[in-house]
Image: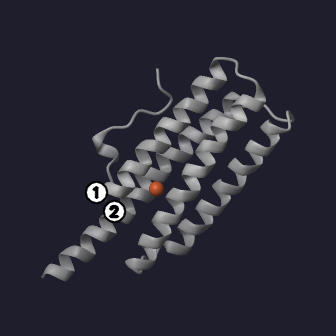
Amino acid sequence: MALVTWSQSMSVGIPAVDTQHQSLVELVNRVDEATRAGRSPVELAVVVGELVDAMVAHFRTEQALFAEHAYPGARAQRRLHDDLTSRATTLRAGLAAGRKMITPEVLLYLRDWLRSHIESEGRTFGRFVASTRRVAVA
Ligand SMILES: [Fe+2]
């Protein structure tokens, strides 16, 4: 069973963001599968590296959208993005150096982070964008 399953209820209403969120779901599931398959830390570092790259690109997209829409939650979101990027980058480096393993706690952290990022922060931003569109049309 996948660690995280995408469903339409996770849509934030912005197609480009939804597509990137789906990729993040896929990558977190790949990290989970590779860990459970007993891959070596160096092999896991490659998969985590793909997740880090996708995260960084995704956060860049979101931050551009925050700026475009003058989103009041931008600063708080930026802090969360920076924190996660830093943790994931540290994990990748630790795996690549053979100093770290992916524990069940790390997998649960990734799962919970992704769910919160999409279902809470992402949807809050989606509703904000939708509300500004309604104001613009009115
Ligand atoms: Fe996002």
Q: Left or right of 21: which side holds 113?
A: right
- The residue beneath circle 2 is 126
- Above or below: residue 133 compared with residue 113: below
The image quadrant of residue 22 is: top left
| Secondary structure category for the residue under label 1 | loop
- Above or below: residue 40 compared with residue 56: above
Residue at (49% x, 49% y) in the render: 116
Residue 110 position within the rendered picture, expressed as x and y whole percent measured from the top left: 59, 41
Label of residue 13 in the image: 1
| Secondary structure category for the residue under label 2 | helix
Residue 88 position within the rendered picture, expressed as x and y whole percent measured from the top left: 68, 48
Q: Residues within 10 Å of mark 1 (few under 14, many from 20)?
A: some
Residue 107 position within the rendered picture, expressed as x and y whole percent measured from the top left: 63, 33
The answer to whether marks 2 and 1 mark residues whose Cβ atoms lie closer than 8 Å is: yes
- Residue extending furthest toward the top: 37
Residue at (79% x, 45% y) in the render: 93
- Above or below: residue 29 compared with residue 16: above
Nearer-N-terminus badge (2/1): 1
Q: Amino acid at mark 1?
A: Gly
Q: Left or right of 95: which side holds 37?
A: left
Q: Is mark 1 within 8 Å of ligand 1?
A: no
